[in-house]
Image: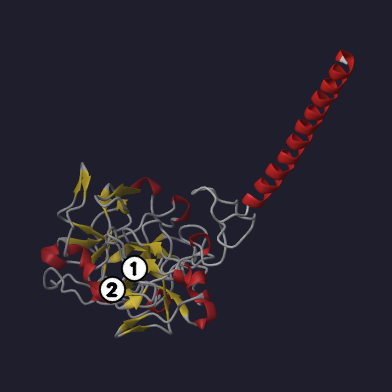
């Protein structure tokens, strides 16, 4: 009896253990199912988010994002301090602060100032923006500078009312690849006119109309009857004037002058402000492109605005806004004989 009781007790214990194993297995399966179901339950813990699918809308670079935005009209180029450069073919050309040629568009208007270059046009011809640094350098009338507001809200520089642009294919300062493109694009002269139409030796109208500093004296020489051309490729040469004798002229045949109030030691220009509206500092020359002048007389000096000016015999040199033709010397003798044409020896030309 005792043995049978022990046997039944052992069986009961085994059955009990088997039941516990089955219950544990069933419980784990239910827990896994509930867990799987809970992964999509909207009542999950706050802040738990599913990762966004890779490349979905709203990712970096999608349509409408700031990464894909570009300035309207191709963006602009800051003008900086404007300057005047004498081009061998175009005469006086306006440049930006980096030395790049500025252009105007025949389809724009100056009265009222208006740009008709936008979209793809403004990508090829970036508008020159009138920033806080935009200012007139030597030989430029500040009153000629203005601005317009473009469609994208940017402020574009105007010169004489004409909106100013750069050309995308001008890759280096001094390039003029945009001149004459399409028959409607032209390099800007300092007064806003077309540099090409200004011709060799013509001066900006802003300075051409400026009153001389004094009435001409008896020594002022009239325009020579003939109109020859300066030697090709020569930046400084001698012209035989009928009254003054041999005088120095630049690459465009413009007579070169000294100012009596300037000094040689130290070399200094005393032509500033309104004086520069009538007398433009002459551009330095290449010593290899001189004819009839002793290279030892030729130099250059840096003006207060950072630009460089030709010097002859250690004295600054200028051109006169009133001279229009090759060899004109209408500035000779002005301001009480303070302005004088220069002979081949670097002295005042007297004709004797």
**Badge 2 vs badge 1, beta-carbon distance below 8 Å:** yes
Local crowd at mark 1 within 10 Å, few (<14), some, or many (≥20)? many
Residue 284: give x, y in percent of width and height: 37, 54
Q: Which residue does the numbered mark 1 point to in the structure image?
A: 254
Residue 323: give x, y in percent of width and height: 28, 73
Question: Looking at the image, which residue is at 48% across and 82% down?
Answer: 184
Residue 20: give x, y in percent of width and height: 75, 31
> In the structure shown, which secondary structural element does the residue marked by tag 1 occupy?
loop
Left or right: 189 with respect to 275? right
Residue 294's place in the image compared with 208, above or below, is above
Depth check: give the residue in front, 144 or 352. 144
Question: Looking at the image, which residue is at 16% across and 56% down?
Answer: 260
Residue 10's place in the image compared with 56, above or below, is above
Question: Looking at the image, which residue is at 17% across and 61% down?
Answer: 273
The image's mark for residue 323 is 2
Q: Is residue 232 visible?
A: yes
Indicate the quadrant containing the C terminus: top left, top right, bottom left or bottom right. Answer: bottom left
Local crowd at mark 2 within 10 Å, few (<14), some, or many (≥20)? many
């Amino acid at each position: 009896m005792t043995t049978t009781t022990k046997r039944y007790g052992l069986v009961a214990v085994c059955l009990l253990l088997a039941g516990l194993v089955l219950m544990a297995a069933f419980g784990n399966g239910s827990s896994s199912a509930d867990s799987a179901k809970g992964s999509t339950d909207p009542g999950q813990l706050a802040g738990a988010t599913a990762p966004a699918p890779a490349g979905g809308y709203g990712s970096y670079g999608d349509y409408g994002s700031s990464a894909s935005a570009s300035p309207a009209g191709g963006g602009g180029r800051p003008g900086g301090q404007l300057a005047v450069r004498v081009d061998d073919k175009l005469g006086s050309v306006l440049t930006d602060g980096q030395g790049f040629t500025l252009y105007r568009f025949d389809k724009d208007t100056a009265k009222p100032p208006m740009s008709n270059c936008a979209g793809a046009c403004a990508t090829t011809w970036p508008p020159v923006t009138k920033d806080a640094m935009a200012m007139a350098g030597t030989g430029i009338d500040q009153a000629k500078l203005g601005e317009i507001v473009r469609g994208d809200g940017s402020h574009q520089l105007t010169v004489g009312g004409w909106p100013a642009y750069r050309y995308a294919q001008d890759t280096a300062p001094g390039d003029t690849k945009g001149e004459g493109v399409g028959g409607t694009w032209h390099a800007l002269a300092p007064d806003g006119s077309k540099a090409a139409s200004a011709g060799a030796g013509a001066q900006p109208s802003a300075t051409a109309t400026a009153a001389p500093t004094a009435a001409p004296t008896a020594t002022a020489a009239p325009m020579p009857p003939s109109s020859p051309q300066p030697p090709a490729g020569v930046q400084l040469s001698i012209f035989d004037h009928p009254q003054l004798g041999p005088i120095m002229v630049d690459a465009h045949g413009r007579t070169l002058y000294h100012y009596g109030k300037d000094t040689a030691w130290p070399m200094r220009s005393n032509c500033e402000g309104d004086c520069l509206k009538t007398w433009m500092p002459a551009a330095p020359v290449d010593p290899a492109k001189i004819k009839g002048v002793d290279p030892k007389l030729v130099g250059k000096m840096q003006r207060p605005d950072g630009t460089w000016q030709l010097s002859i015999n250690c004295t600054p040199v200028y051109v006169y806004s009133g001279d229009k033709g090759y060899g004109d010397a209408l500035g000779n003798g002005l301001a009480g004989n303070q302005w004088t044409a220069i002979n081949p020896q670097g002295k005042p030309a007297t004709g004797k």
